[in-house]
Image (cartoon, rainbow, N blue to C red):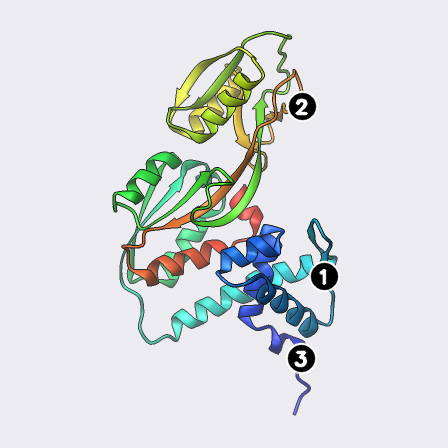
Amino acid sequence: MPETTPATHFDPALLRGFLAVADTGSFTRAAEQLGISQPAVSQQVRRLEQAAGRQLVVRDTRSVALTDNGEAMRGFARQILAAHDQASSYFSGSAMRGRLRFGAADEFALSDLPRILREFRQHHPGIQLELTVAQSGVLQRRLDSNHLDLILINQRPDSDTGRMVHRDQMVWVGLPNTVLEPGETVPLVTYHAPSWSRQAGIDALNAHQIPWRIVCNTRQVLGIMAAVRAGLGLCMLARTRVPGDLRVLSGRFGLPELPMLEQALQANPRSPREPVEALTNSIMNLPLAAIQR
């Protein structure tokens, strides 16, 4: 009989616990995301390290970081879990059917999310997927009014709602040749109100008594990109979503620091559970880069 390889011990539960720690950078937040205790998450990571025969995580009193082997395991874990979920779905003997109303903030249309949704439809042909793309506030209201089953939105990091996918830093963005003189009114390109990113930028400027004016209101990220590229003003974006032809201006011209942004999934408790969980798992198993850009 051939020797058993370590890969046979890569229990999906251990991999999910490890990915939660890797993605949140915290055993505490990972435990909250998984709905289990912090010691249980620590045990899952230790067991995975034992199975791999390598140290995957470096812990200290303030932070959690992945080793080089941990970074490699993160990629393998996503692939293993994706294959595991596909196999489970295929051999479950009861293909899911029904309708799934999914809403996504329009910035995610610039990421790999369309590809993920296409693959989801291929793996679950019995589910009628309906996509709504809008601002996060609009999607939240539609979820609360029972018009959507699952949403992927931007929200405050302290919202304490839904399931966190990723945290990112909000930054000021403009053209490479942008110049702002001291005391000059800051021209803002932003979403229509209500918008959390819009309000975060305005609050930061007001707190530092920096004058501002709205030069462009839009409901779509493509409208924001067009206005900024035309030189109309500055916008606020998650750092990982800044296009290559624009520049991060945070730390320049006396612009105030912006808050962190949380990308999160929120499910409708009144919706059918299986389709919602299936799409949630597909999104949570994405590499971070796929959601970020």
The residues bearing labels 2 and 1 have C-alpha atoms spaced at a distance of: 34 Å
Secondary structure category for the residue under label 3: loop
Up/down of 45 relative to 59, above or below: below
Secondary structure category for the residue under label 1: helix
Badge 2 local density, few (<14 within 10 Å), some, or many (20+)? few
Quadrant of the drawing holding the C terminus:
top right
Q: Quadrant of residue 9?
A: bottom right
Mark sitting earlier along the chain (3/2): 3
Residue 27: horizontal and vertical position, in percent?
61, 57
The residues bearing labels 3 and 2 have C-alpha atoms spaced at a distance of: 50 Å
> Residue, x 31% and y 54% (percent of image)?
269
Cβ–Cβ under 8 Å for marks 2 and 1:
no
Quadrant of the drawing holding the N terminus:
bottom right
The residues bearing labels 1 and 3 have C-alpha atoms spaced at a distance of: 17 Å
Q: Quadrant of residue 58?
A: bottom right
> Position of 288 compared to 109: left or right?
right
Please tell me the numbered disc located at residue 5: 3
Q: Amino acid at mark 2?
A: Gly
Q: Amino acid at mark 3?
A: Thr
Mark sitting earlier along the chain (2/1): 1
> Residue, x 45% and y 57% (percent of image)?
282
Please tell me the numbered disc located at residue 251: 2
Residue 216: horizontal and vertical position, in percent?
43, 17
Up/down of 101 relative to 13, above or below: above
Residue 278: horizontal and vertical position, in percent?
39, 61
Question: Is residue 246 something that shows in the picture?
Answer: yes
Mark sitting earlier along the chain (1/3): 3
Q: Residue tagged by mark 1?
A: 69
> Position of 57 compared to 273: left or right?
right
> Position of 11 compared to 120: left or right?
right
Question: Is residue 285 something that shows in the picture?
Answer: no
> Residue, x 62% and y 15% (percent of image)?
178
